[in-house]
Image (cartoon, grey):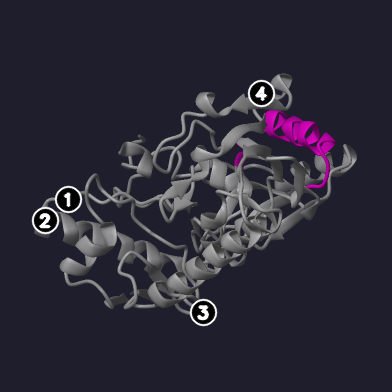
């Protein structure tokens, strides 16, 4: 944890005087498709926050090594690997570094009997439905998770009584800071998967992962998916949010304890604790990330004062440097 009370995971990069025009020129010379001052906050499900200084889209595996050249040649260049942005809050000041995203070339499933390879940029709800149509059971829960496969592996995403670790065989991972390792196949038991945690670091990107599912009945799986979708529509809000904000403390429900603290439906400027589910924070259209960030701290402090329970967020905070003491789920 750094001097501001955040984990390294949460404070990702500040401006250290990097010459981004030089970075862009170097990237173009080696064949990367680079964009300066690219949208970032609007790519997240909160849809608030600023831009990134520079962005590159990975269209093929060969791009990974080229990106590593940039990362390792430019001192002080921050790196942010971004998936669907469903678990991220970007500062209104944006991110002063390099954002890396996988293209749709990595949004796929490959079937081999009961083993399925899923690309890192594949949205989980799409994968869940396609796997169900093949009469494979065990991934229906993922229809309710709006993230991409890569981020889901990184945080061991889960819901409805299941999680990534239960069916994952291995993941292919590339580390931009250690390119000599190449694309490494990491087995389930080496990923350190536990509640909303893995050993995958911010400088690593999940290219794809393999899963083993059980053979079942297509209609049963599709019916389960339908029931999950219905439940989520009835019990969780839509709109501009990033799902659950705080990790459930051991033996407790974060949503219930926030509601018991009297915060359900409360607001701070352009951010609101959902009246439907107290562990969701809604951002208003044309709102700002600062208000969401502030409301997170208000919730954390209020729950601590009333119940002596320290809530920790599972949201990745990008570009913030305020000493709010919000800490990541990895502390549990």
Q: Above or below — where is 313 with respect to 201?
A: below
- Residue 178 image label: 4
Q: Which residue is drawn at 72% across and 19% down?
A: 180
- Decide: marks 1, 3 in contact (CB < 8 A)? no
Q: Between residues 239 and 16, which one lies in front from this camera angle?
A: 239
Q: Above or below — where is 237 with respect to 163?
A: below
Tell me the magenta residue range.
Answer: 58-79
Q: Between residues 234 and 111, which one lies in front from this camera angle?
A: 111
Circle 2 SS class: helix
x, y (%) of residue 184?
68, 25
x, y (%) of residue 18?
64, 42
Drawn side of residue 100 relative to residue 4, left or right:
right
Drawn side of residue 207 relative to residue 66, left or right:
left
Q: Residues within 10 Å of mark 2 (few under 14, many from 20)?
A: few
Q: Distance between the residues labelled 4 and 1?
A: 39 Å
- Of labels 4 and 1, earlier in sequence is 4
- Residue 286 image label: 3
Q: Distance between the residues labelled 3 and 2?
A: 34 Å
- Of labels 2 and 4, earlier in sequence is 4
Quadrant hosting residue 153: top right
Circle 4 SS class: loop
């Amino acid at each position: 944890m750094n001097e501001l009370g955040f984990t390294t995971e949460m404070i990702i990069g500040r401006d250290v005087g990097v010459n981004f025009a030089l970075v862009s020129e170097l990237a173009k010379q080696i064949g990367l498709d680079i964009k300066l001052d690219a949208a970032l906050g609007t790519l997240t499900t909160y849809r608030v926050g600023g831009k990134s200084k520079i962005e590159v889209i990975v269209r093929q595996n060969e791009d990974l090594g080229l990106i590593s050249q940039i990362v390792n040649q430019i001192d002080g260049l921050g790196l942010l690997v971004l998936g669907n942005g469903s678990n991220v809050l970007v500062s209104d000041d944006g991110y002063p570094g390099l954002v890396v995203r996988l293209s749709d070339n990595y949004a796929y499933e490959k079937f081999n009997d009961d083993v399925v390879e899923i690309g890192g940029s594949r949205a989980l709800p799409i994968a869940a439905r396609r796997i169900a149509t093949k009469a494979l059971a065990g991934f229906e829960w993922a229809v309710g998770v709006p993230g991409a496969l890569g981020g889901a592996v990184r945080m061991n995403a889960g819901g409805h009584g299941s999680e990534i670790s239960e069916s994952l065989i291995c993941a292919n991972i590339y580390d931009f800071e250690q390119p000599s390792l190449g694309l490494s196949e990491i087995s389930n038991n080496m990923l350190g998967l536990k509640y909303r945690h893995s050993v995958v670091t911010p400088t690593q990107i999940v290219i794809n992962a393999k899963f083993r599912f059980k053979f079942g009945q297509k209609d049963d799986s599709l019916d389960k998916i339908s029931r999950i979708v219905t439940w989520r529509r009835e019990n969780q809000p839509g709109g501009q949010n990033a799902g659950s904000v705080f990790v459930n403390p051991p033996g407790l429900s974060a949503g219930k304890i926030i509601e018991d603290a009297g915060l359900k439906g409360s607001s701070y400027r352009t951010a609101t604790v959902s009246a439907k589910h107290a562990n969701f924070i809604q951002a208003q259209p044309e709102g700002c990330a600062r208000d969401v960030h502030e409301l997170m701290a208000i919730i954390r402090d209020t729950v601590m004062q009333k119940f002596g329970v320290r809530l920790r967020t599972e949201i990745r905070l990008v570009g913030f440097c305020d000493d709010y003491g919000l800490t990541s789920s990895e502390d549990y």
